[in-house]
Image (cartoon, helix red, strand yellow):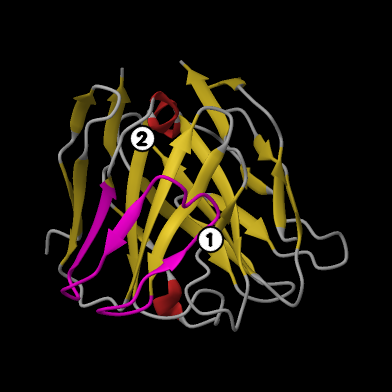
Amino acid sequence: NAGVTQTPKFRVLKTGQSMTLLCAQDMNHEYMYWYRQDPGMGLRLIHYSVGEGTTAKGEVPDGYNVSRLKKQNFLLGLESAAPSQTSVYFCASSYGTSGSGDPQETQYFGPGTRLLVL
Amino acid sequence: GDSVTQMEGPVTLSEEAFLTINCTYTATGYPSLFWYVQYPGEGLQLLLKATKADDKGSNKGFEATYRKETTSFHLEKGSVQVSDSAVYFCALSVPDQAGTALIFGKGTTLSVSS
């Protein structure tokens, strides 16, 4: 199993350009998440999905859109990139609800996408 | 709201030293608690977890005990190795809130020298 994969690994954009980050998981997980990691800030949730065809906003959703057309894929889009979106983006997935005490609540993370917006 | 506070780093230790990274939390209800580790250039990996008070999570020589009375989940290791150099994140999740994901602390960088 590949686990959680992310493409691309690194990208440089100019302000105003658009791009899509792809996350794929082969563990048949229901829940998927996009986080961003910034120095001194930890990880912050951008958007998440509790199943195919569903999406919801997290802590810092502005400037991003997401889609979950297939259970195994979760796409993060930037329609008009800004320098403030320079960050490392992590995708994660889990089988069940967070905090349920169920061992399947563990989140599995991808290797990250480093994005630089000039 | 729910939050996690962990000690700021960097923490610099010599090999075989004792490690403690403090983590305290604020949460409604009874959260599950986690420690994740991020090695250089990689994504986060679950290190250990605990789902109820007085539970002890352990893995790879690391331990943490869920202390409800002090709202803490401190990470400890008796003898660190150079290979333990990484960033450590404390996190919580709140039960019965579907898809609310994890709430992370800001991370503590550990550097171990030989």
Of marks 1 and 2, the one in the foreground: 2
> Is A13 left or right of A41, judged from the image as shown?
left
- Which amino acid, by three-letter code, is at mark 2? Val
Residue at image position (20%, 72%) is: A27
Q: Residue furthest right?
A: B69
> Is A92 left or right of B35, judged from the image as shown?
left
- State the mark number for residue B102: 1
Residue at image position (39%, 24%) is: A83
Residue at image position (34%, 47%) is: A90
- Which amino acid, by three-letter code, is at mark 1? Leu
Disc 1 and disc 2 in contact, CB within 8 angstroms: no
Tell me where residue A74 appears, x and y as whole percent: 24, 62
Q: Residue furthest left?
A: A1
Confirm whether the magenta stretch covers residue A22: no
- Whether residue B15 is visible to the viewer of this picture, yes or no, is no
Could you tell me what secondary structure mostly forms the magenta stretch?
A: loop
B24 w.r.t. A27: above or below: above
Q: Secondary structure at mark 1?
A: loop
Confirm whether the magenta stretch covers residue A64: yes
- State the mark number for residue A31: none
- State the mark number for residue A88: 2
Residue at image position (45%, 38%) is: A37
Tell me where residue B104 appears, x and y as whole percent: 58, 50
